Structures are given as structure tokens and as C-alpha cells.
Amino acid sequence: MDYDPEMTAAAQESRAWPFEEARKLVGRVAKDGRSSVLFATGYGPSGLPHIGTFGEVARTSMVRHAFEVLTEGKVATRLVAFSDDMDGLRKVPDNVPNRAAMEAHLGKPLTRVPDPFTDSGISFGAANNARLRAFLDRFGFEYEFASATDYYASGRFDATLRKLLAVYDEVMDVILPTLGPERRATYSPFLPVSPSSGKVLQVPMVARDPAAGTITYVDPDTGARITTPVTGGAVKCQWKADWAMRWVALGVDYEMAGKDLIDSVKLSGRIVRALGGVPPEGFNYELFLDEGGQKISKSKGNGLTIDDWLRFADPETLAHFMFQKPTAAKRLHFDVIPRAVEDYQGALAAYPNQAWRERLGNSVWHIHAGAPPAPEVIEARGGAEPLPSFTMLLNLAAVANSHEPQVLWGFLCRYAPHASPSANPTLDRMVRYAIAYYSREIAPRKRYAEPDAVERETLGKLRDLLGRAPADASAADVQAALYDLARSVPRYQDPNAKGATPERPGVSNEFFNMLYRTLLGEERGPRFGSFVALFGVARTKSLVEKALAGELAKAA
RNA sequence: GAGCGCGUAGCUCAGCCGGUAGAGCAUCUGACUUUUAAUCAGGAGGUCCUGGGUUCGAGUCCCAGCGCGCUCACCA
């Protein structure tokens, strides 16, 4: 891999946050002269993959790439996406089917709970892991997936688990002062998996033997006194101890976390020191809030899911959102998507003409690991033009009242005759996204007006006019016919219109506004002749008939 | 109680290493169109929360305060 000297020079001074983060690691490497660093992200598969998990992987990847540039590729890097899938199922999620069946598995490791979404016998933990990986793969992240269940069972944690048992008292000294009296009575960094019920138990230790590597507890279901090794998957760690144990066992150098975990990061760091290790670098990003300013959480099911976002925009736009100010709380809901799309496109368009200094602060450099694609252009007005903005496409979808990409393409081709879905794949995706967004967010809010007597009569004339018009009537012809129709209705006559004469009155805006209100459910709309030409004479006629039958106003 | 974020135009926000305050939307004016919204040109609008400090110079850095909000204090 070659690095542009001007770029690496600019990187040393860049104040973009991924570089600031990466510099912490540069210092760490300089200290002990090691040849590789390990980045980690955590994931709890107790619910569908969280948009925050994507954010964490995206942001960590940005730091990783910044680090590689700073060190000119001389230090190897790895990124582990670690799934805490041995955690006990605490609560049946609200958004799953077969909730009653799932109740029976409360307390068991997530990899021992059947997935409620499928009948394939796969576990809930494994299924959610697969869902997360599918998305990370779709975006093209480079990472190694790791399952806690596998790591525990395979013995990869055994050495560190024994060490944890040896420093048991120190760990208790770190954790106990932070707990309330009730939990303090039962706390243990080791959570044995009950051989009788299969549940992950939160029980106090009655004895332990560091030399043998065993703990002893009383099984709450059977009352039996059980001695078990802490190794080999018989025991899982309580999560702050788990985090610390994992950091030490894997040698994690960098892991970021949400600000709700600030205290946990501190405590886990102290446990790492008790284990004789050095806690990883990292920082705390602000949380994502829903529309009402509440923390987005999988248990509440509020806020956007990854799939939600991808119905309306490319993954890159979500990565762009994640790049922006990770230390500021951000509302993450449908309304922010169009803006993220436009900002991303703007950043992509600006990139080629920027100096390195600006490029390294540009989100697209970080999103695309230093190699952003050339922005797509559209042939129009005899030259290459930037793509129409997403809000413009949304406007088009709204005024065209259409759920079909072809109708939008009809409008677009008037502006750019040489554009087509095959020549402009990005634009084609945006058209589909715009329609999806329109259908989801805008169409349901339409309010169709019930036509009054005069309006009904006028619409009746319009229906007859459309019935007589040829199927391929031009926009101009329809427009002219509309004006003539409106001229015959006193309500819509406007003697003050430009070019109006007493014999041939002008037409007031009120006529068109009436059409929009009754036919499109909007206050404003497109040039109606153009709309008819693109939407189709027959379809417009049936739209008018529906309005006359009161179906539109009733449905809304 | 502890920790964190935010406070800039009517609204949503940007503002990089301190150098005469920006964008989008909304609004207003004009052009164009047979008076409609995929058009164009232009205008108006700000005590950058407050008070100190550093500086030749502060929206930006430091200190204190006010306001709003979130998170953690059970679990992960």
C-alpha cells in the first residue's frame, strides 16, 4: 500500500476526530513497540441488530483506517466484532412473535434460546448474530466476528478466567462499593450456568479454590451445593468483569462505547489492572435519541432500525451520519434521512476539488477508507450536471402522487432526456428511495378535500374532457383544454389576468388549487397538463371519478 | 447525587488551527409562465444564553453562572 506523502503529512495534523482517536493508539504503540493493534466493538444479541451497533463498527473502522494512514501501514490492525451471546435472556423482547414460547427460556444463554422468528432450530443469539453480520457484510466492513459462547466453550478464555479467580477479592473490592445492598449480597463476577435448569445464575459464591480453578455455589432450584470449574464454558462472567476479562484475553487496544457506559468502562478498566493488564483506549460517544429525545434502545424498540434506514437511503449515508460529531447527541428518526443524503452527496461532490487538509476532514474520505467514488452526474442541458437533490425527488414524488419509479423517471427525462435507470444507477436508487420515503412519510399525511357543488360540477366536466381526450394527449393540449374548461366556470374566472379580455376571461389559481386539494390531497402541485401527460389520461380520469365518488376524502 | 451534551436568523442546524457571522427551509421583492412549485435574480432578518478572563482581535480558548435535555446510580 502506497501513501501519498502530502496526505500523510496532512494526517499528522488533522483534527478530524478519527485522527485524534488514532493518535492515542500511536502513542500506545510507540511505548511498547508492538507490531499490531486490536480494535473491538461489542454487541449484545438480545434483540434485533441495533443501529448503534452499526455506528460503533463504522466509527471504529474510521479510527482504524486513520491509524493505518498515520502509521503508513507499518502496524497491522484487526477489528473484532464481539457478540455477548452467552448472556442470559432477561426479558422477552416486545417485538418478537411467539412470546409465550420464549418465556420458558428466560435466564438461559441467548445461544440456548430458540429464535422466535424462524423454525429452523437456530438460536436467538445465533440468528441475531447472523442478522448483524449480514448488514456489516452488506456495507463491506472488514472485521472478524467473535461469539462469546464459542470463546468460552473452546477454552480461549480459560487462562484469563483462572487469573480472574485468583484476584477475586480485588475484583469484589472494585465492584461492591458501586452496588446497592441487595445486589451486593449476591454479587459474584462469575455466573455459573446451572446444570439442572440451563440458566445463567446470579448467585453468591460459598467457596472458591483458585488452585483448582473452581467455585462453589448453591443451586437455587435444587438446593444442591455445586462445585464447578470456572473454565470451559461452565461459567460466564458478570458483564463488567466479562468486558475486562475479554479485553485482557484478546489483548484489545481500542474499544469505544456510548456515554451510558462511562462508569462501566472505568470499573472494567480497574478490573483489567487487577488482572495485570492495560485497559484499551477508547472514547464515549453520545447516545442516539428518538424523535422525543429519549435514548434509543432495543428493549424499547423506539427509533430507527438499520433496515428502516436502508429502505430510504444508501448505507453510506448512514455512515455519514455516524461520522458527524459523535460527541453530540443526535436525534435519529425518519426526518433526518433526507438531510443525511444531501449532506453526503454534497461531501462527495466537494471532495475531488479539496486539498488534503480538507479531504481528511471530509466524511467521505473516512467512509470509503480514503477512496471515495466519483460522484454520479446526469447529462442535461448539454453538459454534466449534479444529480437532483433528494428533497427535489421527494417533492416530485409528492406532486406526482406516484408510488411508481417510472412516473418519476418520466419527469426526470423531461429535464434530462439522456438519463435512464441503467445510465444513472445511483439516481435510480434515489428515485426508489424517494418513492419509499414518500409512501411511508408523506402519502399518509395527505388530506383530500371533499368537493362542494361547484367543484363537483367542474370535476365532472374534467372527467368528460378526459374521456374525450386521446390517450397520448400532449401536456400543452391538456393544459389548454383545462384553461378553456375553467374559463366557463364563473368561480374560476379572473378578469385581471394577464391577457384577459371581457370575452375571454383569465383563469385564477383557485382552479388549480382546487384540483390539488381534491385530487392530490396537497395544497400545491405540478403543472396539471404535465401531470396528466405523465400520469396518463385514463388514470387521471379514474382519479377524478374517485374524487367525485368521495373515495379520496373518505380514505384520508 | 454523579457524569455528559446542547444554547448561533422565525425553524433545523453548520461554523475547521482565534481573523469583519453562514446554509437549507420559511418570508419579502422582481423576472418568466395564458397569474401553478423541477426556473432565475435579488432583499430583509442575529446582544452567537449571561458575566468575567486571555488576546491586537473571541461564536471559537479559559473560569464562573443561567437555562434546556439526556445518561448512570437494578440489568446489560
Image (tube, coloured by chain):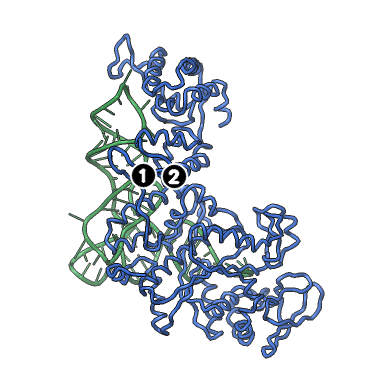
Query: x%, y% of residue A53?
Result: 53, 62
| In this rendering, position of residue A130 left or right of residue A59 | right
* Rendered position, A496 above or below A381: above
Amino acid at circle 1: Leu
Query: x%, y% of residue A177?
Result: 59, 79
* Front one among A421 and A528: A421
* Front one among A75 and A173: A75
Name the residue beneath numbered marker 2.
A430
Among the 4 quarters of the image, the one containing residue A64: bottom left
Query: x%, y% of residue A433?
Result: 47, 44
Both on one chain, marks 1 and 2?
A: yes
| In this rendering, position of residue A122 left or right of residue A556 | right
Q: Residue at x 62, y 71 (%)?
A: A148
In this rendering, does residue A257 appear at all? yes
Question: Which SS class for mark 2?
Answer: helix
Q: Residue furthest top?
A: A503
Which chain shows up in green?
A: B
Name the residue beneath numbered marker 1.
A387
Tell me if label 1 and label 2 are in contact, CB under 8 Å: yes
* Rendered position, A335 above or below A543: below
Q: Residue at x 48, y 72 (%)?
A: A78
Pointer 2: residues within 10 angstroms few (<14), some, or many (20+)? many
Q: Residue at x 59, y 85 (%)?
A: A170
Query: x%, y% of residue A301?
Result: 59, 54
* Rendered position, B34 above or below A71: above
Among the 4 quarters of the image, the one containing residue A356: bottom left
Chain A, colour shown: blue
Among the 4 quarters of the image, the one containing residue A497: top left
Pointer 1: residues within 10 angstroms few (<14), some, or many (20+)? some
Quadrant including the C terminus of chain A: top right
Q: The numbered mark 1 sits on a residue in which chain?
A: A
Amino acid at circle 2: Met
